[in-house]
């Protein structure tokens, strides 16, 4: 369990991990996501700190980013980041709830706010948005924040 | 325990006609703004579905719509009771992108306010854990004593709760005159009060009966569920984002990160009291060792017009130069973690080189602890539910963002 082991094992899989100081980042294809996640768990990354989606309408992709964290002292300062790019029209990735149990609410939130479908997730229903919410997911770039004008009545 | 067993316990179950559903909330069930659907068989809880999001404000989206600096007072409103610790992670992420480091005096001042906020936040949580088991004296005492730390923070920052104290490159205000003496007085008072809390609350047999052995979270479960803060450390896992050495001056100070082995509700309560003691130790050391010097990085001090710079340095107050709000955030990404009273907060800031962040991801400690509402109560009697809730120090506006 060390950062060197992690980098070596990721490279053995034919991936290209990048060490950015406080993060080891690796880009994977959706079909390899689960395999890499399991590797991270074996290397001591016992839970997720975050799941997020980054909307990039210019490239027509949504980037799903996972940050895994470890409570083992030797890995404290180093997060492990997995990045998956999926088409914006049909953003689907396998759910990692079997690998990291605390993906339960993190994935559900990202489905709720970014519209990424986590296949195999047992509870994809509204979490933060109201149950009858319709319209584009609010964190997508094409969702515009409604602003109210300032009205001053002059006598 | 394999993750499949853990998953089975995490999922919500509807149950058959023998299951009775109790809806608690969303009107203030005790701390407010959330709803629990508690499923009971007789008096035994078979499942709890936490229904959160009642105070959701889409903060991640709002942060994309304004200049990076303006998101500091925005994020503060997630955890208004702990506003320095909730924003310091965001400020650190911006500093990493901007390539600027705060001068030593600013790092000491940030640590000072962080610990004052932590004490106030723990008092808030301990007060609520009192009222959850109908111990209103504890509630009144804690909220009364929290006032001491709020007024001290007001003295330092100018605002009771919405401090917006840390800014990229430093802090907004210097230490006021006579502050150290007031802080030492507050510490003396708080030490005496903690002893009184012990007598009336922690050693009270009725409180012990409600909290001891309830909601036990084992160490390996806490690790796998990614639980944070005192709830994690009460299960015997020594982890605290202050130990990462990314912010403040914690690596230069002498303090202990307390842990407990029991993992029950009582251990979580006692741990908060112990953390208050440690925070006071940190404050004493900060006041003793704080170095002289500027409170804002040289790079930004130069932005202030010379006419205003001299008085600003003399008075120890930085008035934002207009250009500061229009800083371009260099293209790139940064992550930062900080330890709040409730636990670790995570920020991921993505910038495309404009004034506004392209994406800000924030995962708050209360959101990470939501899983515990699913995981801990099943198997307990309904009476234990408020005790479990009270021991978790859950803060809905922080979770909902």
Image (spheres, coloured by chain):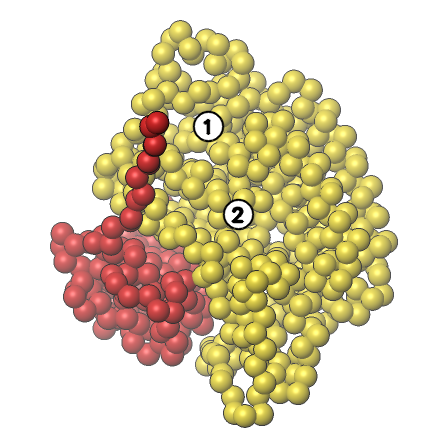
| Residue B170, label in figure | 1
> Farthest bottom residue?
B17
Does B148 sit above or below residue A1? above
- The chain containing the residue under callout 2 comes to B
| Pick the front one: B17 or B210 | B17
Q: Which residue is mark 2?
A: B79
Q: Residue at x 30, y 29 (%)?
A: B327
Q: Residue at x 53, y 67 (%)?
A: B35
Residue B41's image quarter? bottom right
Q: Secondary structure at mark 2?
A: loop
- The chain containing the residue under callout 1 comes to B
| Pick the front one: B69 or A144 | A144
Q: Is residue A132 found left or right of B194 in the rendered image?
A: left
**Would you say residue B93 is visible in this rendering?**
yes
| Pick the front one: B331 or B149 | B149
Chain B: give its colour: yellow
Q: Is residue B95 found left or right of B236 in the rendered image?
A: left
Q: Residues within 10 Å of mark 2 (few under 14, many from 20)?
A: many
Chain A: give its colour: red
Contact (CB < 8 A) between labels 1 and 2?
no
What is the x, y in percent for residue A50? 40, 59
Residue B269's image quarter? bottom right
Q: Secondary structure at mark 1?
A: strand
**Would you say residue B363 is visible in this rendering?**
no
| Residue B264, label in figure | none
Q: Is residue B183 found left or right of B69 in the rendered image?
A: right
Residue A130's image quarter? bottom left
């Amino acid at each position: 369990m060390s950062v060197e082991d992690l980098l070596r094992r990721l490279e053995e899989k034919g991936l290209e991990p990048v060490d950015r100081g406080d993060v080891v980042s690796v880009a994977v294809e959706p079909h390899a996501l689960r395999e890499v996640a399991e590797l991270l768990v074996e290397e001591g990354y016992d839970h997720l700190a975050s799941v997020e989606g980054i909307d990039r309408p210019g490239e027509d992709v949504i980037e799903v980013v996972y940050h895994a964290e470890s409570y083992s002292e030797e890995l404290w300062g180093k997060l492990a980041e997995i990045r998956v790019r999926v088409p914006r029209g049909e953003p689907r990735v396998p759910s990692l709830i079997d690998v990291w149990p605390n993906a339960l609410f993190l994935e559900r939130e990202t489905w709720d706010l970014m519209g990424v479908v986590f296949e195999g997730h047992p509870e994809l229903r509204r979490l933060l948005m109201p149950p009858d919410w319709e319209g584009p997911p609010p964190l997508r770039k094409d969702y515009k924040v409604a602003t109210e004008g300032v009205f001053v009545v002059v006598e | 325990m394999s993750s499949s067993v853990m998953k089975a316990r995490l999922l919500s179950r509807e149950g058959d006609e023998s299951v009775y559903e109790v809806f608690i909330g969303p009107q203030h069930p005790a701390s407010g703004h959330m709803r629990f659907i508690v499923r009971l068989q007789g008096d035994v809880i078979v499942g709890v579905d936490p229904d959160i999001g009642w105070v959701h404000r889409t903060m991640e989206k709002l942060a994309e719509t304004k200049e990076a600096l303006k998101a500091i007072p925005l994020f503060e409103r997630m955890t208004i009771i702990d506003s320095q610790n909730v924003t310091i992670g965001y400020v650190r992420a911006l500093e990493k992108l901007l390539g600027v480091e705060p001068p030593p005096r600013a790092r000491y001042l940030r640590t000072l306010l962080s610990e004052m906020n932590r004490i106030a936040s723990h008092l808030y949580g301990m007060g609520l854990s009192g009222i959850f088991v109908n111990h209103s004296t504890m509630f009144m005492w804690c909220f009364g004593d929290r006032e001491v730390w709020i007024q001290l923070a007001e003295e330092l920052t100018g605002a009771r709760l919405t401090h917006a104290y840390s800014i990229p490159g430093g802090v907004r205000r210097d230490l006021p005159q006579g502050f150290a003496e007031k802080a030492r007085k507050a510490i003396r008072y708080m030490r005496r009060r903690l002893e009184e809390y012990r007598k009336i609350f922690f050693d009270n047999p009725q409180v012990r009966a409600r909290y001891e052995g309830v909601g036990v979270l084992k160490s390996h479960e806490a690790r796998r569920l990614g639980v944070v803060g005192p709830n994690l450390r009460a299960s015997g896992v020594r982890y605290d984002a202050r130990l990462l050495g990314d912010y403040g001056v914690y690596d230069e100070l002498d303090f202990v990160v307390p842990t407990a082995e029991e993992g029950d509700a009582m251990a979580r309560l006692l741990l908060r009291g112990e953390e208050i003691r440690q925070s006071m130790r940190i404050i004493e050391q900060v006041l003793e060792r704080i170095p002289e010097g500027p409170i804002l990085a040289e790079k930004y001090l130069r932005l202030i017009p010379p006419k205003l710079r001299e008085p600003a340095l003399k008075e120890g107050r930085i008035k934002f130069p207009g250009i500061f709000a229009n800083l371009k955030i260099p293209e790139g990404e940064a992550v930062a973690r900080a330890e709040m009273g409730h636990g670790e907060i995570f920020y991921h800031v993505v910038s495309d080189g404009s004034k506004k962040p392209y994406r800000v991801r924030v995962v708050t400690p209360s959101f990470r602890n939501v899983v515990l509402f699913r995981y801990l109560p099943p198997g307990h009697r309904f009476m234990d539910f408020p005790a479990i809730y009270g021991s978790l120090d859950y803060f809905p506006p922080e979770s909902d963002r």
